[in-house]
Amino acid sequence: MLPSFYQKYLDKYLKPAQLITLKMLVWLLQSQKQVRIERLAACLPLPILQNSCRRHIQRFLALGKLSILALWFPLIREILSHQLKAGTQLIIAIDRTQWKENNVLMVSAIYQKRAWPIFWTLLDKKGACSLAELSASFTPSNSTIKQI
């Protein structure tokens, strides 16, 4: 399920019940391959009603502890500090993709043919963007990205 490195890191930030919920959701996403809350709630192995499962998932996903700034940036920093040695090359990739009606801009760190998503945002504009428009998307959180 979750690698031991993630497990140790997440133990510091999440309560035991929250960690169990996260593990169950990761397992469900891997087995169901769908990100619909209704579908996940129907398959969540909890002895409660499906509607209660749906609300449980919604409350869990709305936790402030699961934000990009609070959890993801420090986790990526830990991963990169453990994986990278001084003087090695790290590639930063910026990619935009259309996913259904969502225009997603993604920044990833690539090292030894593995990519870790560092930051993502939904763009207001549909379709391709110019470099100036992409840069403007990162302006509010530019200082946050530099902290990594």
Image (cartoon, rainbow, N blue to C red):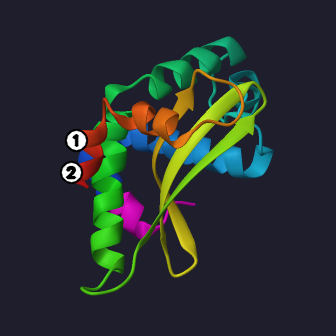
Q: Tag on residue 23?
A: none
Say which residue appears at 78% left-offset and 44% top-offset.
32
Left or right for 49, reference 119: right
Residue type at the position of mark 2: Gln
Identify which residue is drawn at 58% across, 78% down: 113
Where's residue 105, x and y in %? 56, 40
Quarter of the rendering containing residue 140 = top left
The residue tagged 2 is: 147
- Depth check: give the residue in front, 81 or 51: 81
Q: Is residue 112 left or right of residue 42?
A: left
State the extent of the magenta-drawn residues as a range.
Answer: 1-8
Mark 1 touches mark 2? (CB < 8 Å): yes
Q: Position of residue 98 (x, y in %)?
A: 73, 37
Q: Which residue is mark 1?
A: 143
Q: Quadrant of the N terminus?
A: bottom right
Label 2: few (<14), some (14–19) or many (≥20) C-alpha neighbours in 10 Å: few
What is the spatial separation of the Cα atoms under label 1 and label 2, in whole angstroms? 7 Å
Viewer-closest of 132 and 56: 132
33 vs 61: above or below: below
Check the picture and name the quadrant holding the C terminus: bottom left
Q: Nearer the viewer, residue 17 or 28?
A: 28
Instruction: Please tell me which residue is depicted at 76% across the width and 26% down the height of the picture.
Output: 42
Q: Position of residue 123 (x, y in %)?
A: 57, 27
- Residues 29 and 77: in front is 77
Label 2's element?
helix
Q: Position of residue 107 (x, y in %)?
A: 48, 51
Q: From the viewer's perspective, is residue 62 above or below residue 81?
A: above
Q: Can the viewer see residue 69 in this picture?
A: yes
